[in-house]
Image: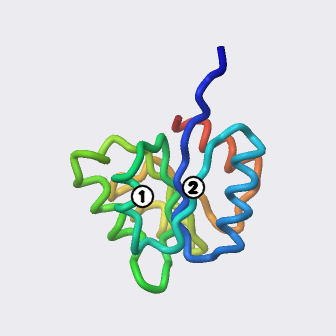
Amino acid sequence: MTAIAPRILVADDDQALSRTLSWILKENGYEVQTVPGGEHLFEHLSAEPFDLLLLDIMMPKVDGLQLLQRVKSDPRFCHLPVLMISSMPPEEATVRSLGLGAADFIPKPFRVRELLARVKAHL
């Protein structure tokens, strides 16, 4: 019997970083989809179930913290663990993210082992 791989959605406007995150996560047994930026985040979340969301804070068209607030206030997604990722100063970003309901915060640039440990901890 094969276990079902946890499904992770990555929302980041940096396509190179999204590809890197996707590759790292897939290499470690996760099923990954990416959404460029956050404009279409809710379309992806509504289309199929995910076990975790990796969400960038600073994106040009949509603010990641506002998206986090919307995710957490939506009854369909409020229990979805959201890991915020950003190059913002970690103290400020962590406090703001956790205050809005994020499960965790990962600073950019991230360390791969730490990223994987944080993802695993919230699944």
Residue sitting at 23 percent across and 54 percent down? Answer: 73
Secondary structure, mark 2, is strand
Determine whether, in the image, residue 24 is placed left or right of residue 3: right
Quadrant of image for the N terminus: top right
Tag 1, which secondary structure?
helix
The reply, left or right, for residue 19 in relation to residue 85 is right
Q: Is residue 9 above or below residue 108?
A: above
The x, y position of residue 90, in whole percent, is 56, 67
Residue kind at label 2, given as amino acid type: Gln
Using the image, tell me which numbered label, if any, was put on residue 65.
none
**Residue that carries the numbered disc 2 in the rendered image:** 33
Give the answer, above or below, for where 43 lies relative to 114.
Answer: below
User: Above or below — where is 12 with respect to 97?
Assistant: below
Q: How many numbered markers are drawn?
A: 2
Say whether marks 2 and 1 touch (CB < 8 Å): yes
Q: Residue 44: which numbered mark, if any?
A: 1
**Residue at position x 42%, y 43% from top?**
49
Give residue 71's position: percent from left, percent from top. Answer: 31, 56
**Sequence-first tag of 2 and 1:** 2
Q: Position of residue 19 (x, y in %)?
A: 70, 65
Q: Residue at x 71, y 37 (%)?
A: 29
Q: CA distance from mark 2 to mark 1?
A: 9 Å
Q: Residue at x 48, y 85 (%)?
A: 60
In the foreground, 92 or 9:
9
Outermost top residue: 1
State the image coordinates of residue 44 (x, y, percent, origin top left): 42, 58
Compare residues 25 and 106 and report the one nearer the observer: 25
Q: Is residue 68 above or below residue 51?
A: below
